[in-house]
Amino acid sequence: MATATQSTDRLSSTNPATGEVIGTVPIMTAAEVDAAVARARVAAETWSTRSFAARTEELVAFRKAIAAEATEIADLLHRENGKPELEALTEVMMALGHVQHATAIAEKAMAPRKVGAGILANFRASISYHPLGVIGVIGPWNYPLFTPMGSIAYALAAGNAVVWKPSELTPLVALEIERIAKRTFALPDLLQVVTGAGATGAALAKAAVDKIAFTGSAATGKRVMQAASERLTPVLLELGGKDPMIVDADADIAKAAEAAVYGALTNAGQACISVERVYVNEAVHDQFVEEVVRQVRDLKVGGDDGHLGAMTSPAQVTIVRDHLEDAVAKGAKVLTGGPDAIAGNYIQPTVLTNVDHRMKVMTEETFGPVLPIAKVRSVDEAVKLANDSNYGLGSSVFAGKAARAIADRLRAGMTSVNSVMAFAGIPTLPFGGIGDSGFGRIHGEEGIREFTRIKSTAEQAFSLPLNMMSFRQPKDMPTKLRGMIKQLYGEGLVSRAGDVIRKLRK
Ligand code: NDP
């Protein structure tokens, strides 16, 4: 029987392609979230004391169990999110890549480091990394497995327990992973899922967790940060972007077009690192557009084997329609798709030209299968427009020899050169953005350390006659200090602190 604080309400998970209800889950209350966090705290106390080898053994079992059920998990992703089967399988594979990588690098990433002690030359100084405790992960609906796993795997490998709030649109995939976790980890509360809508996520942000890792919109990210501030809980925010692609005159146009089509349309454009706008040098603009349109016309929308699936949420369809209508009203040319080609949850891939920064489609996150292409006169103009955004997540550059130099000028957390989205598939590379795209990093060694607390230790190896950490100082100490300041930081700079100390001892 439900207790007073236990949820009795449920929400439905619906297949966006068919409207069929595929399952229901409880809408958990704040009290239930707090209870899950308390159980996670107990699990974390044990998990954090295990050796890396012991944790590795369990994380490998977890990974293998997910891999064994890859087909079933991908099928659930396909039905719950609307993405085609191939994209669902790709998502499972990429998520597993991070479980493997996080497990493999945790010990090295958290290895204590000796550092120089500066003028306190009689000290041994070291930095060590320790698990934070309990991590709250709030996941999105567009990559319901891959995105949260980018935090979960690294948090677990670093020795933390996790409480995961999936999006209300995609809770079933999360529950499937929780089921596997309960079976494979010795501590059943190490990875728990709390289901519900925004209020459940808000309760997790306010709960006694040691960090919140959030992926979603900038607006909700701000709310999460505000809620977390009540306890001064640190947050990691992965908030989407308006990723630009630059195509210079000497780029391989066929390859650039292929990458733009994939980067803008994979997952029906519902990726935080989607190509959301393209700036093409006028010398190759028409050729690029022609190639893009040719490739887009070959794409199939809908069906299990389609290139593009149904949009996950009707609310997102409304946003995409609004951006397209706004662009058309301001003079954009529709080459494929367009606002009139939207039917239910399906949006035909849309290529636009004659676009500029007065249009929402060039400045706000569209998060749909839309590829707006702008003509530019120079690399400088392309870079200026690419950087004209509050977002700064991913980006891509197609060019000849100057490609790396162009990439360095982009104000973004990540850039792919002569490719798209590749930084997300390379598990050693930290993933995250700047500005409205958020802060903090998942993936790579930085992704492990993101879920640790840094401890600095200063150990006195031997004592010196001159002890700065004491009130018992000789009378002439001010004179000595004046000399020291001059020697160390002024004209008479002495490179080694030891030399100064020896001189002062005389
Ligand atoms: P949200 O930012 O609202 O949702 C992301 C997650 O936050 C979901 O799990 C959601 O739960 C949860 N959430 C909602 N309200 C709160 C709250 N007050 N406190 C804590 N958690 C909360 O995304 P939307 O679904 O509204 O999408 C809107 C826009 O966000 C899109 O148009 C797109 O631009 C962007 N987006 C970016 C993503 C990315 O990968 N960076 C992913 C998804 C969206 P629930 O779903 O149950 O409400």
Image: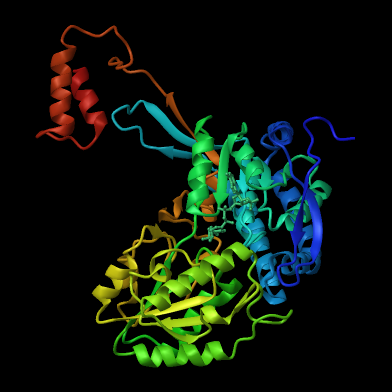
* Residue 329, position as x, y percentages in the image: 40, 76
| Rendered position, 43 above or below 384 | above
> In the rendered image, is residue 470 in sight?
yes
Residue name at image x 16 percent, y 14 percent: 478
Along the viewing direction, whichever of 381 and 180 lies nearer the viewer: 381
Q: Is residue 190 above or below residue 120?
A: below
Frontmost residue, 180 versus 480: 180
User: Which is nearer the eye, 71 or 32?
Assistant: 32
Looking at the rendered image, the quarter that the N terminus falls into is top right
**Left or right, 276 with reference to 80:** left
User: Residue 25 placed where, x, y %?
Assistant: 79, 50
Q: Is residue 229 above or below residue 263?
A: above
Counting every numbered tag in the picture gives 0
Looking at the image, residue 284 sits to the left or right of residue 349; the answer is left
Residue at image location 68% in from the left, 35% down from the top: 30
Q: In this view, does 399 lie to the left or right of 221?
A: left
